[in-house]
Amino acid sequence: MTTESNDATTTNYHNMDFNYDNDDDYQQHQSPTNNNNSGAPSIRPAAFETEATNSDGLNINNRAAPTTNLSELSLPKKKSSILGASSNLVNSIVGAGIIGIPYALRMSGLWAGVLLLLLVAVLTDKSLRLLIEQASFHPKLHHLPIHTFEDLASYPYGKFGSGFVLFNMFIMAYGAMVAYLLIIKDTVPTVLGFEHGENLLERNLILVATSLLIMVPLSMQRDMASLSCTSAISVTADMILVVFVAAFSPVAETVEENGGLGEVLRTDGINSTLFVGLGILSTAMACQHSAFIVANSLEDKTRSRWSWVTKQSIGVSAILCLILGIFGYLGFLGETQGDVLNNFPMGTVQADGARILLAFTMFFTYPMESFVARHVLIMLIHNGDMDAKGGCTLENESRVEEEELGDEGGGGGEGDDLTVSTSRSIIEGGGLLCMNRRQTWTLLVYLSTLFPALIFNDIGPVLSLTGAIGGGCIAYIGPGLVYLGVNGEDFLNSILARLERWRGTKDVNNNSGSGGVTEEDLPVDGDASLEIDATTSIDAYERIGSGSKPLWYYLGLFPIWCAIANKGATHLKKKTDAAFAVTGVSAESAPGDHSLLLPPPTKRDYSIALFFVCFGVVSAVAGVMSNLYVQWNNLDEVDYGDGN
């Protein structure tokens, strides 16, 4: 994305990072860089310095532009079609979680589990579209370098937002990888003749050998687009596996032993361990931590193309989960194990074939989560520089040193502006032994997941706790808070308009003679496109809190929502203003087809965002408490044999 300036220069800015999370940083970078008539020094941080060229293509900056832009260091170099991206997303969703769906129905109850699965699928589709649309097509953000979930969260909430996302992304990815290894430990040795629950040494050795030969090399790949072929194989294996469970699960015998289908449907509605099942379902469907990786790999990313990817992926995944979950659970009911294939007898061709298919799925799905875990660690430790090409950031004070530079290189005089620059920090490249940085972190992530997989045996608690904590935060709370923060100004204006109308009916005058917002300035109820004037919208939060408020304001928790929206709106304005100070390009003046951008948010959009947050908080807290209750009382105890 480029823009023409007054001196016929062209500035490349779309891959720069604007991290101004402290007020001091923000104030420093607000010194005039455009239309500077005050004679004050021009501040141009080198970390965000752009490559300016004249019409002949020559660099005209006083100092060399950065050779590597931080935010593009880990961007994919390969692109996927809609089918390829959909395969990757389905593979990310239908991992270890699908084999635990029957167990989730056992914990939740049949009716409650099916309804929860459908609800989780709808919420997942909505949240995937919400995240990518806010990052790439929001009127205030579409021109900025937002390539990851944590990038998006940092705009309204700063370091807290990015840290919250990264922490929960790692929990989700780490828990899933441990579960995948546990499934390999369950399946491959069983096919080779080692009975489940016995021969633990042999099972662990087989796990180490197979994971090192298959999972680790695939995880070493740089871009997710490289896994499109293996993802297609994995999805195909999942479909065949679902057919197997539906065909060979002893549904008729088990249902008949329990009084018939009518009796089962009548009595198996909802259980006290409902939220344990919800945690597993959240793990099965959660893919928000992979959404940006998949979306960035999509060729010609548009709202409609991304919508096609999410609808296809979520639809296929939900259907597969429903079929396998219902038939798997009805086949074994109260004896259903965390890995439903452990309920099938050893030695039969059908059961061993299903275990092989499941092993293929785990081999090819593990790298998807490894990509996410590696991404989090590289972001936290190497500032996103996966290829060890060098990078810079204002957040890492130990690596970035600010200094004032006088007139260097000749040709300057007293009339020249003083340029306050930030020296670029070169991060040392390479990794351990003969490996590069990407390979080193991939191996370390693998080893960190291997050790617990060697020690533990049951994937049920792993899936449930991962979904309760990581899934609740990354799949529900995170997207809801991001939407509320990014659209915080509109949300506050909407609430203020409703309050002003209510106060008007009560003859309450809250303008205090200060010439504040009048009723004519307020947006029409339900029309978020009509906003309070930009010079007065900053006062919306103060005006909301200054006057009397109706009962619905407190019952709907609007004091909390307004505080969150105010925090998001304030920080978002700081970061977008900082971006404008560096580039001189606003969201309105940025090139591109603005008709493709998002329309103004509606009441329904805000209601969905608030529901996301509430649902996520309840599922996380209740999920953890339910898991503790289940484990303490051994409510999920199953017979794994003498070796367990």
Image (cartoon, rainbow, N blue to C red):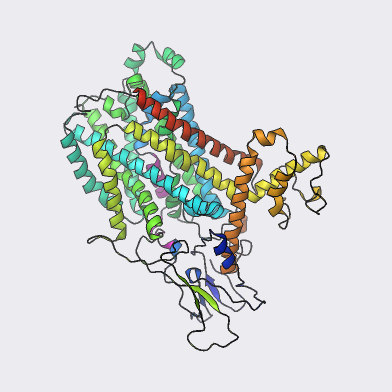
Query: Residue 475, can we see it?
Result: yes
Q: Quadrant of the C terminus?
A: top left
On the image, the x and y values in percent for residue 338 come to 33, 29
Instruction: Return the residue nearer the eye: 503 or 182.
Output: 503
**In this picture, residue 131 sits left or right of residue 538:** left
* Residue at the image point whose x is 47% and y is 86% from the top: 409
Say if the magenta span includes residue 73.
yes
Q: In the displayed structure, would residue 254 be above or below residue 629?
A: above
Instruction: Return the residue nearer the eye: 25 or 565.
Output: 25
Say if the magenta span includes residue 484.
no
Q: In the displayed structure, would residue 22 be above or below residue 178?
A: below
On the image, the x and y values in percent for residue 97 come to 37, 35
Q: In the displayed structure, would residue 459 be above or below residue 112?
A: below
Q: In the displayed structure, would residue 497 be above or below residue 391?
A: above
**In this picture, residue 343 sits left or right of residue 112:** left
**In this picture, residue 434 sits left or right of residue 6:** left
* Residue at the image point whose x is 66% and y is 49% from the top: 490
On the image, the x and y values in percent for residue 587 come to 61, 61
- The magenta stretch spans which residues? 72-93
Furthest residue in direction top, as rendered: 259
How many numbered dots are placed on residues in this image? 0
On the image, the x and y values in percent for residue 530 come to 72, 50
- Quadrant hosting residue 638: top left
- Quadrant hosting residue 271: top left
Query: Residue 356, can we see it?
Result: no
Instruction: Return the residue nearer the eye: 29 or 206.
Output: 29
**In this picture, residue 547 sits left or right of residue 414:** right
